[in-house]
Image: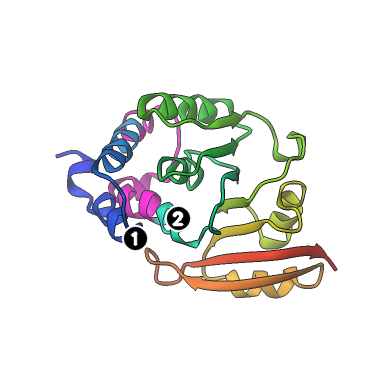
Amino acid sequence: MTVSARDPGLARVAEAVPGVSRETLDRLAAYLALLERWQPRINLVSRTTLAEAGTRHFLDSAQLRPLLPEGARVLVDLGSGAGFPGLVLAMLGLPDVHLIESDGRKCAFLREAARVTGTPVTVHNRRIEAVPAFAADVVTSRALAPLDDLLALSEPFLGAAGTALFLKGRQAEDELTLARRHWRMQAEMIDSITEPEGRVLRIREVARA
């Protein structure tokens, strides 16, 4: 039995994101199958999470979809890795998604996953600091850096009206406290639907203190 067949996480995406079509779920399943094939050659995700990838990676990413601001079009995903959450959100309907990843092998995977699933995205094979600034409606990141550093990396893309959605773990509250020493922001902490200690930070009106 394949990982895709025994992991219920993909089916739960339809619960987390109302209105997801069967076609979209099939594209996510094709993405998961590609991840399984590439994982032995490239360390795309933690080996211990591969058996539950549908929940640990796909559903974890999809939970951001209902949290996006209404009308959001341009999304920048920092340190995309294997495409979580950025590529999943592109498959769920975001029309202009930019995946920033410095590892060339992971970028090759991202481009192949986009090709196989027919998902239009822009892959930037550069360090985040080297990508020319442009305005985005949303900036996302998952397991990349402490919040203070994430806000600095996001600043060239966020603008005054942008929203940041960061998937965080048990240290989310402490990171938020430390970041407030250098940043002014409106921040919400939302419980993750996939991890008991996980949190989603939704941050708006970001400015340096």
The amino acid marked with disc number 2 is Arg
- In front: 46, or 28? 28
> Would residue 144 be seen by someone viewing this image from the given angle?
no
Confirm whether the magenta stretch covers residue 57. yes
State which quarter of the image contains the N terminus: top left
**Residue type at the position of mark 1:** Ala
Label ID, residue 168: none
Q: Is residue 40 left or right of residue 208?
A: left
Left or right for 164, reference 190? right
Residue 196: which quarter of the image? Answer: bottom left
Q: Position of residue 38 (x, y in %)?
A: 37, 29
Task: Measuring from the top left, give residue 33's x and y in whole percent.
Answer: 29, 34
> Which residue is labeled 1 in the image?
16
Q: Is residue 187 magenta?
A: no
Q: In the figure, 193 relative to 4: above or below?
A: below
Q: Residue at 28% x, 60% y: name it.
A: 15
Structural crowding at the residue carrying mark 1, measured as other residues with C-alpha within 10 Å and reported as few (<14), some (14–19) or many (≥20) = some
Q: Decide whether the magenta segment is chiefly helix, strand or loop.
A: helix
Q: Nearer the viewer, residue 117 or 126?
A: 117
Can residue 48 be spotted in the picture? yes
Residue depicted at 64% across the width and 74% down the height: 174
Q: Nearer the viewer, residue 14 or 104?
A: 14
Q: Where's the C terminus, which quadrant?
A: bottom right
* Residue 20 higher or lower than 197, as above or below: above
SS category of the residue bearing label 1: helix
Q: Residue furthest left?
A: 1
x and y, in percent, of residue 191 in the image: 46, 72
Label number found at residue 65: 2
Nearer the N terminus, badge 1 or badge 2? 1
Residue range corresponding to the magenta coloring = 35-59
